[in-house]
Every structure is written in C-alpha cells, then in structure tokens.
Amino acid sequence: MTASAHGDRILILDFGAQYSQLIARRIREQRVYCEIQPPNWPLEKIRAFAPRGIVLSGGPSSVYAEGAPSVDRGIYALGVPVLGICYGQQLMAYQLGGVVEKADAREYGRAALHVEQPHPLFEGWGSADHNVWMSHGDRVLRLPPGFEVIATSENSPFAAVAHKSDPIVGVQFHPEVVHTEAGGLILRNFARGMCGCTGVWTPAAFVEDAIARVRERVGDKRVICGLS
C-alpha cells in the first residue's frame, strides 16, 4: 500500500532542529508515513496533504525574537492533533496566548519526568518517573487559555501540557532521542493513538510510491539522481 493510497500520514514542520530527521524516523518505525516540510509551508498545501496529525519540531531560535520561524495559526483549527516539541511547544504557547521568556539557566541533559495526570500521550507509561532529555534556553512562563499541565520535572513545571478539549499537546523535552526513556512510546501514542493512524505503511511502500511518481513525471526520459 502506498502512502498516497490511504490517509495515514503525519506532517512534521521543521524549525531547524538537529533532531527533525530523527522525529521522522521514530514515527516511521511505528509504520506511519510522514514528511518534513518548512514551517512556512502554506496552509492550503497542509490542507491538501491532509495529515492525520502535525508535529512542530524543536529549533535553535527564540519564539519572541524578531524574524523567528513561525507557522500559520490556522493549523490549530484544522481539527487534527498537534504535538509541539521543545521550540514547537514554546511556539504553540506563544501563538495561542501564553508567555515565553528566556530561562534563568539553560536546561540541558537528563531530567526525571513525572506524569501529573492521565493523558493519551502517556498511555502505557506506568506510575514510575522516566528520564527524558531536555535541551532549551527558553521556557513557558504562562500557559495559554484552555491548557493544563500533564507532566512536570524538577526544573520544568510545564514539561508537558495539553489543551483541555482540543487534541493539542506540547512537550519541553525531546521524545525522539534515545536518552528519553519510553520516547518511542510517546510518539507511538501520538501517531497511532491520538492521530488514529493504523500503522500499515512500510518503507517499501514509500519506494514504490516514489518510483511511481517519478515515472509519471518523467515518462521515458532519463533521470539523474544526486545523493549527499
């Protein structure tokens, strides 16, 4: 089954994070097709892509800085789950009416995450705390209206947040890296649980779909492929 043959697809909007490709890899390991696009990808193209969910990646910028990368706020009204990771969480909070500021000290390294209340993002997490990987210099100071805390760490009172009625969640840590225990479970819960993807896609299907699209476009002409 090709990616275009079903609606199981996740869109990753990349804010320049070094881990964006790793987010995609972790989601594809859940047998869910995903694509990475720039944050300024037009809303009409996002609608046409028809993702089951959207991931806002991390990034090196500060959301309140002039010229910082952003997204069309219309993505929050598409009715599909949105997961903000690190910068993505801060941008989500900033755009929806919260406050983001420079942290007193940059938080980098392992932190014990404590789940404060049940949420589909932490389904199967268990009662114990798990180590997660933090890497950020800014922090959310005040949540937007309608949001609540679902997990904390010693230095991050908003380590994970969620909207009370809409499927919008944000995490300050990086679930995609191996340093985060059960990070794969979190991304599985987002893609397969919150977004409802069935997990029937395979990398072989991607190759098949890519070849078919190239043949449709090129016909009987020759193709040169350059790889880095």
Image (spheres, rainbow, N blue to C red):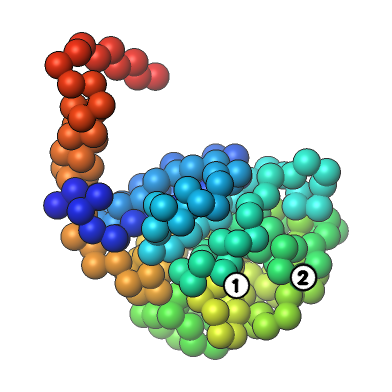
- Image-quadrant location for residue 117: bottom right
Q: Amino acid at mark 2?
A: Gly
Q: Which residue type carries mark 1?
A: Ala
Which residue is at 39% across, 80% downward?
Answer: 123
Marks 1 and 2 close (CB-CB < 8 Å): no
Question: Horizontally, is 196 left or right of 210 in the view?
Answer: right
Examine the rendered structure and indicate whether residue 223 appears above or below residue 68.
above
Mark 2 highlights which residue?
Answer: 97
Q: Is residue 129 above or below residue 83?
A: below
65 or 76, nearer to the observer: 76
Disc with the residue nearer the chain's start (1 vs 2): 2
Query: Observer-nearest residue: 211 or 127?
Result: 211
Residue 182 is left or right of residue 158, and the answer is left
| Location of the C terminus (image quadrant) | top left
Q: Is residue 22 visible?
A: no
Q: Position of residue 208 (x, y in %)?
A: 16, 38
Q: Residue at x 56, y 47 (%)?
A: 42
Q: Position of residue 114 (x, y in %)?
A: 57, 78
The front one of 125 and 219 is: 219
